[in-house]
Amino acid sequence: MRVAFLGATKGMGRALARLMVERGDTICLLGRSSVDLERSATDLSVRGAADPVPSVVCDLEKPETFAGAVDAAREALGGLDAVIVTAGVFAIQEDLEADPLLAERLVRVNFSNTVVFCEVAKKALLDDGGGTLCVFSSVAGERGRKPVIIYGAAKAGLTHYLEGLDHKHRAEGLRVITVKPGFVKTSMTAGLEPPPFAGEPDAVARRVLGAIDRGAPVVYAPAPWRLIMAVIRALPRAIMRRINF
Amino acid sequence: MGEPPISTLSGWGRHSAPGRERVGEDLERISADVNLSRGLGRSYGDASLPPDDQPTVLNTTFADRILGFDEDTGLFRAESGLALSDLNRLLMPRGYFSPVSPGTKFVTLGGMVAADVHGKNQHKDGNFGDHVTALKMRVADGRVLECSPQQHPDLFRATIGGMGLTGHILEVEFGMRRIPSQWIWQESRRIHDIDEFQDALEDAAPEWPYTMGWIDCLARGKNMGRGILMTGRWAEADQAPSGAPKPGFQPRLRFDWPEWVLSGLTIRMFNELYYRKQWRRQSSGIVSHESFYYPLDAIGSWNRMYGRRGFTQYQCVLPREAGRSSARRVLEVLTSRGGASFLCVIKDFGRESRGTLSFPRPGITLALDIAVRDDTQDLVDALNEQVLQEGGRIYLAKDSFTRREHFEAMEGVRLDEFRAIRDRWDPNRRFRSAQSVRLLGD
């Protein structure tokens, strides 16, 4: 599989990219810092025992870079079979409430800009006859919850967008996969107390790769979060109002 | 984002201290205001634990990228949080292995440098630090710099085996070794007492790249030091089964065993059975490198076997000059006090490492796993007094009970040199651990 990967330098993206190169997929890295991209490219090329891994600077904060970056990735790989997006920003609710500019940035990057990136990626994939667009949203987008009001709202918007995209384009051969990670132990969640069922990036990566191969439209990872979120979605508002989950 | 709340950090022996870990992929960015690094927490004692007054430590395990590998020369470079288990998984199938590996693969490259680990090939290949060609470090004044035998050689030497007290190790460069297969040709042999053991290790040294022995520590008198000598070498490709060893079922201890489980009686039974297992005088065969190198890694969280209070590993080296009988005298200290060691390992060391405070020196090393009980401090004190008399020293990666006066007496001029290097690089003693406060006073 030829994959353009936005966000493979850290966390779950790093774990997923490693899994993919180790089984022989070819990847082009997209990311903000050329120094960081270079380091991850070396890591992946040694792990995959493959040719140098190409990389292209692409900043999720700068939508004007998207089209050029996706084109460059497509050229470097000689075509595109999949685009994966794990990049995004995170902040705790408290900090977002204290700083409206931070809240604006988070919603812009995680929702609007990610949507714009997906529009660009979608076009490129459809031009090549379809493929897979796999995007990391979050269980935070399942329901309005006190600890993740703003982050969750951005992810809810993203989840909706991705579902619509999947419905519209599946018949044309474009499979859109929405990943909904629960709590995963990465540097993103480093300051937070891990709840039960907190997952490891490697296990999440294996599950996501399975979903990509099967074309499953929605994947919760780690698996127990599917059930947890089913319960949360079913809770009456009166109860949601009382709990702090 | 904020720091996590202060909780409890512990070493592999479950010795613990209040602390919290800062994690992240970019060590250069997040290491500026923390004063100790920690990897997978496999040092047994308090080496990776923070001192009381600075509870935050840097956890390096998310910094695990490979930064270069030359298949022709074997030269390898990676961020310091890369685990040996990951390295083995990736490069063993391609015919490369770490030049030195400790008895667990769940260690980071940074930890392997900081403890200057040794393995079953110490008598031939020295320590891990002997194969390190360069380190990237963040030092106390905030600079990020490269050190090597040519660049800042004093910092380089003091960092190898320096238990993280000279700065943060950010990147490690070393030479990987070619291996013909992932399998080991192993021979094991029954040994009747401690003197025979030392002869056997000495005889095996020129012939075998890997040697070590297991001792039944409860056997006394004429049987003292009986056990099994294990020797091995990489199997040639035509001797080895085709393909890689398959990972077996990996059990994991889910809870702390109650303390009565490891009583004098059960330890005696285990040791007796283990000794009887080698019922033939000698046996040989092909085994996977995992079962040869990392037998204990097969059981996850095996340290829980020792219960809530945990255990300590007492590891000392007795110099050649102390003579054959020195090992017997140290074991006598253990048995005369009724001390029961569940597992006891013996190994010969060939040479001293280049690390300023590195553990090995030519002689015999003994490692005793001892469950922590009310009398453990007294037992370690008594062992240390004997080791001092023999002119030996202890391994910091294992220690949590040694007293400062014993440590200072064991290390003498080496400690003076280490302090002088620390004075140059960290005069205000930013880099400290619970262990450095206990053993060095700062």
Image (cartoon, coloured by chain):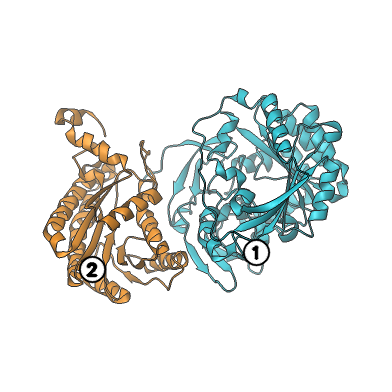
Chain colours: A orange, B cyan
Q: Quadrant of residue B215?
A: top right
Disc 2 marks which amino acid? Answer: Phe
**Residue count near mark 1 (Cα–Cα under 10 Å), binned few <14, some 14–19, many ≥20:** some
Residue B353's x, y, as percent? 72, 57
Residue B400 in the figure: left or right of residue B107: right
**Is residue B419 at all visible to an observer of this figure?**
no
Determine the residue positioned at 82% across, 31% down.
B220
Residue denoted by label 2: A66
Seen as rendered, the residue at the extreme left is: A168
| Up-down relation of residue B2 to residue B202 (above or below) | above
Q: Quadrant of the N terminus of chain A?
A: bottom left
**Is residue A184 at all visible to an observer of this figure?**
yes
Report helix, strand or loop for mark 2: helix
Residue B283's x, y, as percent? 73, 48
Determine the residue positioned at 18% across, 46% down.
A153
Disc 1 marks which amino acid? Answer: Glu
Give the Cα separation between the discs numbered 1 and 2. Answer: 52 Å
Residue B307's x, y, as percent? 57, 29
Residue B228 in the figure: left or right of residue A8: right
Seen from the viewer's position, the closer of residues B142 and B385 is B385
Pointer 1 indicates a residue of which chain? B
Q: Quadrant of residue B263?
A: top right
Residue B119's x, y, as percent? 67, 53
Q: Quadrant of residue A232?
A: top left
Which numbered marker is on residue B375?
none
Pointer 2 indicates a residue of which chain? A
Residue denoted by label 1: B236
